[in-house]
Amino acid sequence: MGNSTRSRAVLIIASKQRIRRDRGEGVFVLVQPERHIFLKPNVTRVAAENYGFDFRYASRPSWSGYANLLEFASLVRRDLRDRPRDMIDIQSFIWVLGSDEYS
């Protein structure tokens, strides 16, 4: 089973069984942090708005929603001067950009 197929499988299972989104994502982030990212919806919405990115979030897990998050992460990766090691670094940047803690 390819990585893309595994990602879709977790999202399909999550949507069918209504498990928490972060548990499904967490598996992939831990196994492949260079390819997968956690979604923190509120922070990511604010960060994307501040960044000028059209983030299309829906509370129900879907491949298109996760692909949109990966697109945002890819844009952030491209724009960062100090190259991030993995998506955990990118998630940290998104958190700082979208969190009230750093306003």
Image (cartoon, rainbow, N blue to C red):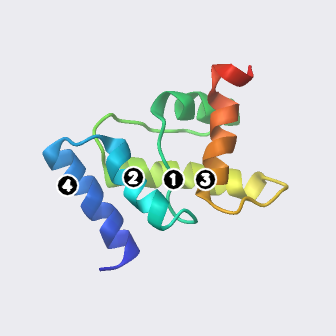
- Amino acid type, mark 1: Ile
Q: Which residue is mark 4?
A: 13
Residue at x 73%, y 24% (from the top left corner): 102
Q: CA distance from mark 2 to mark 1?
A: 7 Å
Residue at x 70%, y 63% (from the top left corner): 85
Q: Which residue is mark 1?
A: 37
Q: Earlier in the sequence, mark 2 or mark 1?
A: 2
Instruction: Using the rendered view, name the quadrant where residue 7 is placed.
Output: bottom left
User: What x and y, as percent, mark residue 65?
Assistant: 39, 47
User: Which structural element holds mark 1?
Assistant: loop
Q: Which residue is mark 3?
A: 88
Whether label 4 touches label 3, CB < 8 Å? no
Q: CA distance from mark 3 to mark 1?
A: 7 Å
Depicted 41 relative to depicted 81: above or below: above
Q: Which residue is mark 2?
A: 25
- Amino acid type, mark 2: Glu
Whether label 2 touches label 1, CB < 8 Å? yes
- Amino acid type, mark 3: Ile
Depicted 63 relative to depicted 40: above or below: below
User: Which structural element holds mark 4?
Assistant: helix
Residue at x 63%, y 33% (from the top left corner): 47
User: What x and y, as percent, mark residue 50?
Assistant: 68, 30
Whether label 3 touches label 1, CB < 8 Å? yes
User: Which structural element holds mark 3?
Assistant: helix
